[in-house]
Image (tube, rainbow, N blue to C red):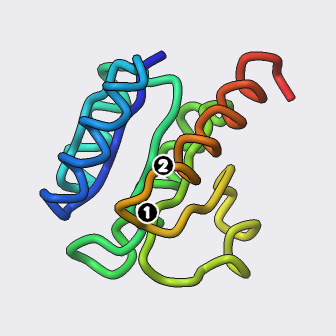
Amino acid sequence: MKILIVEDDRFIRTLYRDELADEGYEVITASTGHEGMALFEREKPDLVTLDVSMSFMDEGLHVLRKMKELRPGVPVIILTAFDYRDELEVWDADAYVMKSSDLSELKSTIKEACGAYEFGV
C-alpha cells in the first residue's frame, strides 16, 4: 500500500515517513500542496495524510478538494495541530487525526481507512 504524506514541517514529515515505512507501507512525501498534488496524480497513492494548515492558510483544504475531485475513492486523513472536528464532514475528508509524536492513533486510522477503501465501504 502506497501512502502520500503532505506535510510542510520537515521533522513531522520525516517522523511519519519513517514510522509508516517501518509498518511496511510504501511512503512518499511532499512538503507543499503543489508538490503533493503532482505526486498524487503521478504516483496514484492508496491513501493520503494531509496537513491542512501549511504555508498558506487554506492550502491544505484546496489540495483536499482537488484530490477528492480527481480520485474521490482515495481516503484522505487530515493531520493537524488544531481542532477542526466540526469541519471534517464539510471538507469531505475521511478521517481526522491530531498531530503527535505518538503515531498509534494515526496508524489505527490508516488501517481502518485502508480496510474501508479495499472493501468499498
**Where residue 44 appears, x then y in whole percent?**
42, 20
Q: How many marks?
A: 2
**Label 1 sits on residue:** 62
Q: Is residue 64 above or below residue 108?
A: below
Callout 1 secondary element? helix
**Distance from Cα at disc 2 to Cα at disc 1:** 6 Å
Q: Is residue 1 left or right of residue 37?
A: right
Q: Identity of the amino acid at label 2?
A: Lys
In the image: residue 102, left or right of residue 107: left
Residue found at x 69% / y 57%: 92
Q: Quadrant of residue 117?
A: top right
Q: Nearer the viewer, residue 96 or 70?
A: 96
**Residue 16 as seen in the image, left or right of residue 65:** left
Picture disc at residue 12: none
Crowdedness near tag 1: few (<14), some (14–19) or many (≥20) residues, C-alpha within 10 Å: some
For the point 43% across and 63% down, the residue is 62
User: In terms of image quadrants, where is residue 41?
Assistant: top left
Frontmost residue, 29 versus 112:
112
78 horizontally vs 116: left or right = left
Which residue is outermost to the left?
A: 10
Which residue is tagged 2?
66
Residue depicted at x 64% and y 45%:
109
What amino acid is found at the position of numbered circle 1 in the picture? Answer: His
Quadrant housing the C terminus: top right
Q: Residues within 10 Å of mark 2 (few under 14, many from 20)?
A: few
Judge by depth and name the residue closer to the eye, 83 or 66.
83
Residue sitting farthest toward the right: 121
Residue at image location 27% in from the left, 56% down from the top:
7
Q: Are marks 2 and 1 in contact (CB under 8 Å)?
A: yes
Give the image location of residue 113, x and y in percent. 68, 36
Report x, y in % for residue 86. Answer: 73, 81
Vertical placement of residue 60 versus 67, above or below: below
